[in-house]
Amino acid sequence: MDRPDIDETVDWLQGRGYYGDQITHQRIVDGQGAETEEISVSDPLSIALRQAGIQDLYTHQVRAIESVRNNKNVVVATPTASGKTLTYVVPAIEHALENEGKTLYIAPYRALINDQSDTFQGFADELGFGTSIELGVQTGETSRTERREIRNSQPDVLLATIDQLHLSLLPYAHGKKHWRWLFQQLDTVVIDEVHMYRGVFGSHASLILRRLNRLCDYYNASPQYICCSATIGNPVEHASAVTGQDESTFTLVDDDGSTSGDRHWLFWNPPIKNNGDDENQRAPDPAVGPDGEVRAGHDERSPEQIATALSTGTNSTTESTDRSSEPADEVALPSHQEVVGGERRSHHVESVRLFCDLVTKGYQTLVFTAARQGTEQYVDWADKMLRERGQQELADNVHAYHAALNTDRRLVLEEALRSGDARGVWSTNALELGIDIGTLDVVLLDGYPGTSMSTFQRAGRAGRGDDACLVVLVGADDPLDQYTMREPDELFETGAERAAVNPYNDAIRPDHIVCAASDHFLSPDDETYFGTDLPELVTEAESIGRLARVDSGDRIQWRATDSDVQWNTNIRAIDDREIALIDRNRDEQLASLEFGAAVRDAHPDAIYRHQKQTYRVVELDLESDRALLETTSTPEYTRALREKSITIEDTYQTSSTDDYEMAAQATLGKLTVEDTVTGYLRYSDPSDESPQECEFDRPLESRSVETTGLFITIPTDVEATISSQAESQDEYLSALHAVEHALISLFPMEILCDRGDIGGLSTVSHGQTTGGTIFVHDGHPGGAGLTRQAFGQLDVLLEKTLKLLRNCSCRDGCPSCIHSPHCGNANRSLDKQLAIQLLSELSSFSRSQEINS
């Protein structure tokens, strides 16, 4: 289908009936021509490259390959669609053809393994007569027979997920019929999408790779690492932390030589709700989260009401409006009731309208949205709108893509994107990774992805080759999105966020040390891989019967007592305790939740939504780790109330006021965080502003974790100034609470994380600090390295926090500045104006101290 010029399309969008100055920023990022270079490769490989239409390689590909040839570890950190694949495919094939060793390719997800195996196989099939290499693929879907065949054939290239390395390769490093041959001959390890190994999952991966290094050393193998990454702020440091290799051994390749067309960016901010918006929409929100909380920006109507509105063109749940005079393609989407402050209309509604307009114009469009349920819901909205416009064929060719789809369905959709048959797709971050989906015209971001890294990674899905493309960022109604909408230059001009990983996480390191003892006998020399405090960890594991000393003459060794320790170590989660959710009437398990999520979301009398069905929790039995649920039909929802306490166990580093532009002393340390659900709020419907507060006779079992965090103490002079302006200690606490929320919301601007990965607490007094204190901590046991990374950038985060609060249009606080979807106090006790005054005083106090010094 022919498509119009992008500039013409932007003008056309501005003339649409629903347009009301939503475009807040436009820019064009100029494309570039290809920079190529010749490289000498063997004849069979040269034939395969020519068959793929490749004459010369990009300069960054050549530099990476030459570095591998010079026995260096390599980090390739270039944009999406820049051809990173060839930086490891070429060395892998060369080593196979020259019998120089085996290549192990590791990816975080199965879909990427399947995609890259096709790429490897495509080159292998074109190597020419009499030349061949053998590939093997091991994922959770690989059958026992196929696994046996792989071990027997000993392929040149083995592709496996990090999970399979942990569960199936490392534990079977011995024995002729297992994987010893791989570790003896391992020459190259490819870590694709290394930026995905961050936080707790990355900490698990870093320990798994240390176990791999340990076995390779035992077998006298010394593989090189080729790491491919999105653009992040610390690619070499991060690759080093993940792989356990010294930073000095890595060559960084980040000079992109690939061709690209002009990329047109639009920042599209939904309008602020006003008093003219419909006040009568009180139906339950289909997008209420598992904690019963109404997500900002979601529609308040049931799917049936939305369908009716879309098919009839009505804009209200209570009355019909004659729209016969309006164009057929201006079908009304859900509107929203007015709230106090600067709350904006749904970004999902705006995205659906834009999506329908763009695919109708002939643009193949990919939308990234946050949730699996969202992809299905918004495709349904778009389908109805397109059919109302008479675009039945287009409606048939828009689809949802997410990880919950079965493999066959995902492969069909990927091929449809490549062929152009799929005209539009709504996807979760499942398509953010390097899966080949061909050329796209438009990427629509339904909400800021949370980090500049993800933003540019997703945007890079459009505009292959030298064709111009369009990227539209639709802002959601939360602080991070609205900050980005107001400060667009920061997205393009500030460096990418730093990735954080913690291989010394004491909540998971003991498990991997026991896993290592199961992989191969543990010895005191293994401090090299697991830290100098290994003896203490081994002593503890011995004392509880997880390790047993082995009599081996002069050598000191330990073995694991649990033969299934790898299977009992979940690398995708850190809270091993799970609560089963049971439909009591059908005696059927609906799902399971980690303990912390269960006491929050499935507490007694909680409203819980699952697969479009509403349930009420009738019993939570923590002795048997079961919650019993019954179906119900109600617009109610509940939200847990929590009390948190923090104990400072140790301090690692303390700043002085000279370290920051703001006069807030900060300390990094080890914290114990205890979180207790004490009751809940019961809302009669999503518009209920006066929920019933229900308190349990006895608080639920607490969740206590040791983690890493920082705490900020307010100087005495600043505290005195703010306290004199507050009517009570409660008002001062509300100011601290508001600063805490806003500060945490901006963490993803500096550190690669999700807002939910960070927790906090504010207090006007604490037994271990002086004066008002704001705690910010990693949300996972042992810490994921997030607050540790943020500690050195706290001044930047505090300055941005002040800017966020000053620039939000509301007076008293709203979802765009100080409300948090994770607040244990239901966003009560927040004072925006006093928070602004507090941060302003900190800034002024710091400057006066500097002048007087």
Image (cartoon, helix red, strand yellow):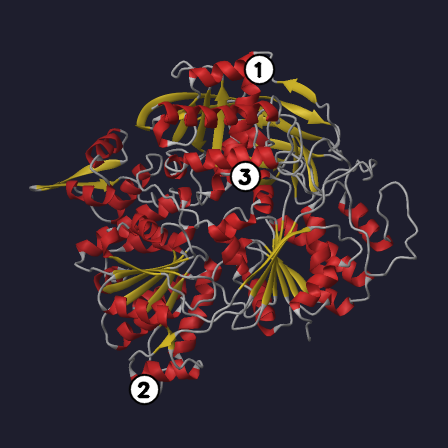
Residue on which disc 1 sits:
725
Report the amino acid beneath label 3.
Answer: Ser
Badge 1 crowding class, 10 Å Cα cut-off, few under 14, some 14 to 19, many 20 or more, is few
The one nearer the camera, 781 or 137, is 781
Q: Is residue 12 visible?
A: yes
The residue that label 3 is drawn on is 592
Q: What residue type is labelled 2?
A: Gly
Instruction: Identify the element where label 2 is drawn.
Output: loop
What's the distance in space between the residues labelled 3 and 1, CA to CA? 48 Å
Amino acid type of the residue tagged 1 in the rendering: Gln
Q: Which of marks 2 and 1 is nearer the N terminus?
A: 2
Left or right, 707 with reference to 210: right
Position of residue 192 in the picture relative to residue 835 (left or right):
left
Q: Distance between the residues labelled 2 and 1?
A: 84 Å
Q: Disc number at residue 696?
A: none
Which of label 2 and label 1 is nearer to you?
Answer: 1
Disc number lying in front (2 or 3): 2
Q: Which of marks 3 and 1 is nearer the N terminus?
A: 3
Residue at point 42%, 19% (across, down):
715
Measured from the top left, where is residue 596 in percent x and y?
50, 31
Task: Identify the image quadrant of the C terminus.
Answer: top left
Q: Is residue 300 toward the left or the right of residue 746 in the image? A: right
Decide: is 311 above or below 363: above
Residue indicated by mark 2: 130
Quarter residue 586 falls in: top right
